[in-house]
Amino acid sequence: MKKAPLIPQDAANAAFARALRLRVGRGKLYGFAALAEATELPERNLRAYADEENAPPLHAVLSVFSALGPGFASDVLAAAGMEAQLVEPAAPEHQKLLTAMMRLASDLSEALEDGRVDHREEAALRGPAQQLLEMLGAMAAKRGNRSGR
């Protein structure tokens, strides 16, 4: 007995086509010609994806995600119980930085439970401390040399 995939191909194609038809076409925010220009995909292929005549390959899916944004991507990814969000590559990763700071503080606190940090504990703290310094350095470099006051 052959196992069925978690998300069947026809369901994935239908989710992509439905999201595409909501946003692209006559009287919609985007036309097929404009989307074809933005994605550099043939207009006839985009129309075929919307009509569920052809399944879009991964490069086409990602190109359309990029052109139409996280709302479109979220509509498609909803079939898998997920959603998309726009990532700004130049933005500091505040959550990762805060997590690294709190992890190091927790590890240091645990090491100080007996009143001192021994050589093994210090060695174990060195890696996370170096990682935190690198993260802080990257954040400082993105902010420039302003004092923040």
Image (tube, rainbow, N blue to C red):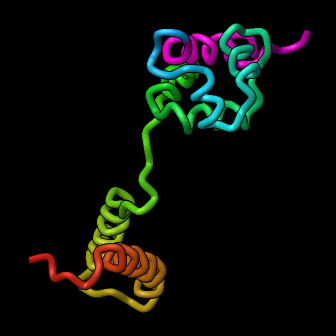
Q: Nearer the viewer, residue 9 or 7?
A: 9
User: From the viewer's perspective, is 84 left or right of 60?
Assistant: left
Q: Residue at x 58, y 11 (%)?
A: 18
Figure check: 132 above or below 92 = below
6 relative to 95 in the view: left or right: right
Based on the displayed image, in which of its 4 quarters is residue 11 positioned?
Answer: top right
Residue 46 visible, this orientation: yes
Give the quadrant of residue 41: top right
* Residue at 44% from the left image edge and 27% from the top image edge: 71
Identity of the residue drawn at 33% across and 86% down: 117
Q: Quadrant of residue 101?
A: bottom left
Give residue 133's position: percent from left, percent from top.
Answer: 38, 81
Query: Is 65 on the left-hand or right-hand side of 14?
Result: left
Tell me if residue 125 can be seen: no
Looking at the image, residue 21 lies above or below residue 30: above
Position of 19 relative to 39 (above/below): above
Residue 8 forms part of the magenta stretch:
yes
Q: Does the magenta-highlighted stretch encompass residue 79?
A: no
Location of residue 44 in the rendering, given as x and y in whole percent from the top left corner: 75, 19
Q: Is residue 121 left or right of residue 16?
A: left
Considering every residue shown, the one lying at the far bottom of the view is 119
Please identify the quadrant where the N terminus is shown.
top right
Give the magenta range. Answer: 1-25
Magenta stretch, main secondary structure class:
helix
What residue is rendered at 36% in x and 64% in y?
A: 92
Q: Position of residue 17 (x, y in %)?
A: 63, 13
